[in-house]
Amino acid sequence: MSTHWAIDLGTSNTTICEDRSGRPRILNLPDLAKLEPVTQTPVMPSCVCVMDRDGEEVLIGQAAVTYNWDGQATGFARGFKRYLGTESGRALARAGGRIFTAQDIAALFLREVIGALEARFGEEVTDITIATPSGFYETYRAELQAIIRRLKHRGWWALMWARLRRRPTGIVFRTLDEPVAAALGYGVDVGRPTTLVAFDFGGGSMEAAVVRTHGARTVETGRAEVLAKQAVELGGDDVDGWILERFVPSALRDWPEWEVALRWEAERVKLLASAGNEGDFTFRNESYGRLDYPVLNDLLAANGLYARIRELLDALLAELRTRHGVLPDGIDDVILEGGSTLLPEVRNVVGDVLGRDKVREWLPFAAVARGACIFAGGAHVEDFIYHDYALRVLPGGDDTGDDTRAEADAEYELLIPGGTCFPTVDNFATRYYAPGFDGQRHINLFICEVGRVAGRPIDWTERSNGSRHFVPKTAGERAFCLCLNEADPALPLEPAGKGAAPRLRVTYAVDENRWLCVTVHDLHRKTDLKVKHPVVRLR
């Protein structure tokens, strides 16, 4: 039996689980991890310290934190997860005159993690699953997949992989939504039909999912169906920022060289206060105030944390009721995941909305990694597409690929609504496209992932022909519409288009692997240009 390895890659901390015998267990890498003070779970700080310009000498986890005790190491980076899906080129660290981006830091972190596992256990890591936030864009998963695949090819940035003992041959890579993984992590003890809410609140995001297990087939060996899920980008890092705003003068906060040290101090007093203790916020031998449970509770309330939790859960219940007719009484258990669930009153706020008697004792740092390991072992999850997917359309129907026009004038025609279960039927959506002008020789099908603006679904406008469209009104709304295939070649029109009659019939479907596939038929030539051709992989 091959070993399944699973990583809960958190914004603040990372947890690793392995399964060699059907009994997943959380790993402790003593040189890299620390024991979380409340639950004593071994967690690895999601931190990297690059020591040279080639990225050959790298510290990660607790070793990186210890090295950067004074916050002055220019090669130190944390929080790379938050930027990996949307700003992978964002500069996070500098070493030897070289800038290291979020993508670089993530690659170095995973390289060192895998290298440490291989050195510790004396075997290749060939089967790895990484849990991903359900609300993140597909580009986040694609970045992770690209990093893992590069482990098989020494031709890319050879020095990056120089410290690996052996090159893996044929890595199996999977991703799984973090809330679903959390449900599976708790679900190993569930042997009855049950409906669970997994509330995942970590360093960078807050997510909730409703998962239904089926009968005596537990989620270890049976099927888990995702009924609803919601997510917002709000996490423990934001709470650290609120603490800094409360205690630290802005003149001190604005010094970049002190940012890391101040953040660690904010996290330290946050953990103390959350556990019912109190601590002085101290920096460079000066105290800036005392934080205890009541003060932290008031701070969280004043910044709207509890209101955001209620909004998220209310939206989840509305989605559950609308799509499946399930009322709150139909929820059996509520599980909590992520270090930020230890914050004051979070458990009670969740319980007030979903029922305090349903909130189980929690494993905030272990369930996601354990659930991802269970999933890798064969537990099947019936999932659905989270975001909406649409065709980018310019007025007149001529999407030429001109970025300036696309940004200013584009509207989006809905193809695959969020909530769609897959695989779909082959003709899930059918569209007819006419040339935008006489003599047009190509038509582009630019597929865009349309995220939730400020955590809320897009309000699609229905046209007289039954199609639904979204027209962004601001640059902020346009930022949530990410084109996934601008590099794809255009569909040729031979002979060139003429007149206003439809020229192409395109049917859209989603296969069992989340791929959006198209079948394109040229109505003039009466021939298929593409048949079930995969275009982009959906989330």
Image (spheres, grey):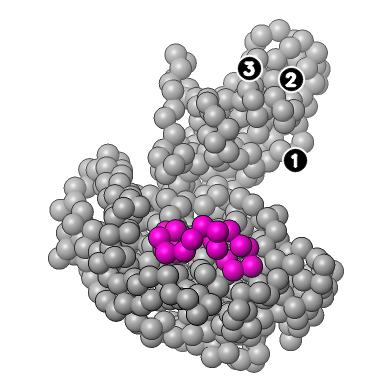
Q: Which residue is mark 3?
A: 395
Give left or right: position of 249 versus 139: left
Q: How many marks?
A: 3
Mark 2 residue type: Arg
Q: Secondary structure at mark 1?
A: loop
Comparing 176 with 338, the one in front is: 338
Q: Position of residue 182 (x, y in %)?
A: 38, 67
Residue at figure coordinates x 60%, y 56% from the top left: 83
Q: Which residue is mark 2?
A: 525
Q: Which residue is mark 1?
A: 487
Residue at figure coordinates x 52%, y 52% from the top left: 136
Mark 3 residue type: Pro
Mark 1 residue type: Ala
User: Which stretch appears magenta?
Assistant: 240-259
Give the foreground label among 1 and 2: 1
Q: Quadrant of residue 55?
A: bottom right
